[in-house]
Amino acid sequence: CSDRVLTLGWLPGEKLDEWGRAGQARAQRARLVAAGVRCTARQFFEVGFFHADPHPGNLLVDGRGRLAYLDFGRMGRLDDDDRFALMSVVVNFANRDAAGLARDFRELGFVDADERAEETLR
């Protein structure tokens, strides 16, 4: 703890980037990636409140091989409209639907309504 950092507790484990360099088995890496995807999907699509800075230095693998998030200094919120629009992005991306993605990007404010996003994405 210092005058610039507030430490609320200690969580033993290894930073994700260090853990990854240690040559973990493929199955262990796959399990951790799946956990990260589930955590992210739940934060975005179910809860609407998410960790906005999940780089490898802010992720930890604990002694039991579980994923833990650190440093909650940057968080975000999604309202229902944005959550549903992001779900649509995932579906349209999986279906390779460029026109659907363009509509989603306009709805989310990533592309201006007067831009021809469909043509840009083809």
Image (cartoon, grey):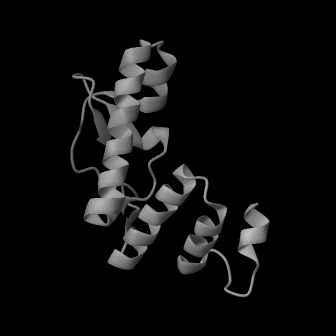
Percent coordinates x, y for residue 27 in the rendering: 38, 16
Residue shown at the point (31%, 57%) measured from the top left: 43
Q: Is any atom of residue 67 visible in this view?
A: yes
Percent coordinates x, y for residue 82 in the rendering: 42, 74
Residue shown at the point (49%, 44%) measured from the top left: 55
In this rendering, is residue 94 above or below 22? below
In this rendering, is residue 77 above or below 121? below
Residue 8 lies left or right of residue 31; in this view the side is: left
- Front residue (pair 50, 119): 119
- Front residue (pair 109, 14): 109
In this rendering, is residue 121 above or below 37? below
Percent coordinates x, y for residue 3 in the rendering: 37, 59
Residue 19 lies left or right of residue 117; in this view the side is: left
Residue 65 lies left or right of residue 73; in this view the side is: left
Residue shown at the point (67%, 86%) measured from the top left: 113
Residue shown at the point (78%, 69%) measured from the top left: 119
Quarter of the image where one finds residue 109:
bottom right
Q: Residue furthest toward the bottom?
A: 114
Percent coordinates x, y for residue 19 in the rendering: 43, 22
Q: Quadrant of the C terminus?
A: bottom right
- Front residue (pair 2, 75): 75
Quarter of the image where one finds residue 28:
top left
- Number of numbered discs on residues: 0
Q: Is any atom of residue 71 visible in this view?
A: no
